[in-house]
Image: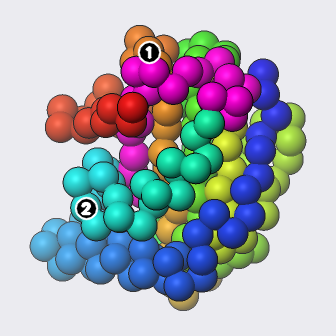
């Protein structure tokens, strides 16, 4: 299994601020539409149906080389991508999970765009990965990861996920594409 790869400054502070505000606005809107109800994650999915695409896609185009994809058992031809955003408030967490049923068939990425930096992502075998605004972490989709419960935070923790595969048959049964009827896979190449 490929060790996680860290790409610092994948997005600028300004780009992350824009994305954090955009996602937070959507969260606030849904909270007002459904007062007193928990807004389930992922709050925003199919991110490439939004203006987020214009900020993120050009960055991925230079990163998704044949060499980089090969580290995760992927090829550029017939590459598919799925995306969503996680928003965590006080008391919320992300339980341990993985995105793929098979090693070396899936690349998962975690992009931290804003919120408290002292709550990182826990990666099995690798420990806690610190939240750094604009940092993208690439990992094998088979690697278990989680986020501890948020405590006493003033602004939501917002991260974005971009998954890549050549074969959607390797998607884990709890992946948003299997539980949401309108979740999309986009053809990258």
Label 2: state its secondary structure: loop
Label placed on residue 135? none
**Vertical placement of 116 versus 3: above or below?**
below
Residue 8 is situated, as x and y percent measured from the top left of the image, at 74, 64
| Secondary structure state at the residue bearing disc 1 | loop
Q: How is the image coloured?
A: rainbow
Q: Is residue 38 left or right of residue 9?
A: left
Q: Nearer the viewer, residue 187 or 141?
A: 187
Look at mark 1 in the image and give the residue it sits on. 167
Q: Nearer the viewer, residue 26 or 151?
A: 26
Q: Which residue is depicted at the point 58% across and 40% down?
A: 64
Q: Residue at x 62, y 36 (%)?
A: 65
Q: Residue 174: in sight, yes or no?
A: no
Q: Residues within 10 Å of mark 2 (few under 14, many from 20)?
A: few
Residue 81 shown in magenta: yes
In this view, 146 is above or below 19: above
Which stretch is magenta?
66-86
């Amino acid at each position: 299994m490929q060790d996680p790869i860290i790409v610092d400054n994948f997005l600028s502070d300004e780009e992350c601020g824009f994305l954090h505000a955009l996602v937070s606005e959507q969260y606030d809107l849904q909270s007002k539409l459904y007062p007193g109800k928990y807004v389930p994650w992922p709050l925003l999915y199919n991110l490439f149906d939004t203006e987020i695409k214009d900020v993120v896609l050009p960055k991925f185009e230079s990163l998704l080389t044949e060499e980089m994809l090969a580290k995760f058992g992927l090829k550029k031809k017939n590459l598919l991508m799925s995306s969503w955003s996680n928003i965590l408030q006080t008391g919320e967490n992300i339980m341990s999970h993985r995105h793929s049923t098979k090693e070396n068939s899936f690349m998962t990425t975690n992009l931290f765009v804003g919120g408290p930096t002292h709550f990182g992502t826990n990666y099995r075998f690798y420990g806690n990965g610190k939240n750094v605004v604009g940092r993208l972490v690439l990992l094998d989709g088979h690697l278990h990861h989680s986020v501890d419960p948020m405590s006493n935070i003033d602004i939501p923790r917002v991260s974005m996920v971009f998954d890549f595969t050549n074969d959607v048959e390797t998607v884990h049964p709890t992946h948003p594409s299997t539980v949401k009827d309108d979740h999309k896979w986009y053809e990258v190449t």
